[in-house]
Amino acid sequence: DADVTQTPRNRITKTGKRIMLECSQTKGHDRMYWYRQDPGLGLRLIYYSFDVKDINKGEISDGYSVSRQAQAKFSLSLESAIPNQTALYFCATSDYGTVNTGELFFGEGSRLTVL
Amino acid sequence: QQPVQSPQAVILREGEDAVINCSSSKALYSVHWYRQKHGEAPVFLMILLKGGEQKGHEKISASFNEKKQQSSLYLTASQLSYSGTYFCGTEFSQDKLIFGTGTRLQVFP
C-alpha cells in the first residue's frame, strides 16, 4: 500500500459543484501539503499544514479550502468548482528530524476535470 | 517567488551530459531536486542545504551557490531512464517548498 494515498484518483464534475479531495498518510509525518500541477506551470502550492491546528495558505489558495482532520488526514475542498480548476492535484508529506530533511513524499495524484 | 529553471527542455542521446539550472531572487535555505516521469508523481532526488555542499545520486549530482542563489543539476552519461521532467524546489526557511516550472528531459538511444 502507498504511504500517501489520495482519493479519488480521477473525478469529472460540473461547474458550481462542491468537490473534496482526500489525502491520508501512514508515514507519521506532521507536515502535509496540497499542490496543483498544470502543464507548463509546474507544481504550485495551495495550502499546507504543520499540525491539526496549523493551516497556512500557499501561492494559490483562492477558491480552495482545507481541513486537517487528524495528523494523518488532510482534505482539499473546492466549494464551487470552475473550469480553470481543472488540473492534477498532489498531496505530499514531509518531516524534519535526524533522518528526514524536509523532502516531500507525494501521493499518486488526483486528476480533476471541471466541465 | 517561483524559482526560474533553464532550459525548459533538453534532448539528449544516451551517454551525453546535461545541466539544468535553477535560480532564485531571494536568499535560500535549501534547494530540492525532483524527477517526474509521465503519469507519475514527482520523486525526490536530492536536497542541498545552505553551505554550498554538493550532493550526488548515482550519476546525477548537484551544486548550490549560496551567493548567487543558484543551483545546478548535473546528469552525467545519461541513460534512457533519466527521461522525465525535473523540478527544482526552493525553501526560504524550513516551511514550504516552492517549485520551478520544470525542465523536460528526453533521452534517446
Image (cartoon, coloured by chain):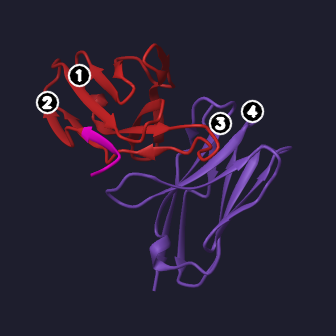
Chain colours: A red, B purple
Q: CA distance from mark 4 to mark 2?
A: 39 Å
The reply to whether the C-beta atoms of the residues labelled 1 and 2 are less than 8 Å apart is: yes
Callout 1: residue from which chain? A
The reply to whether the C-beta atoms of the residues labelled 1 and 4 are less than 8 Å apart is: no
Mark sitting on residue B91 = 3
Q: Amino acid at mark 1?
A: Ala
Q: For this rendering, which residue is in front, A91 or B67?
A: A91
Task: Check disc 1 and report the residue beneath it.
Answer: A81
Q: Is residue B58 left or right of residue A42?
A: right
Secondary element under disc 4, as helix, strand or loop, is loop
Task: Check disc 2 and report the residue beneath it.
Answer: A13
Please tell me how crowded label 2 is: few (under 14), some (14-19), or many (20+) other residues with Cα within 10 Å: some
Q: CA distance from mark 1 to mark 4?
A: 34 Å
- Can residue A5 be found in the magenta stretch? yes
Same chain check for tags 1 and 2: yes
Task: Check disc 4 and report the residue beneath it.
Answer: B26
**Residue B12, image quadrant:** bottom right
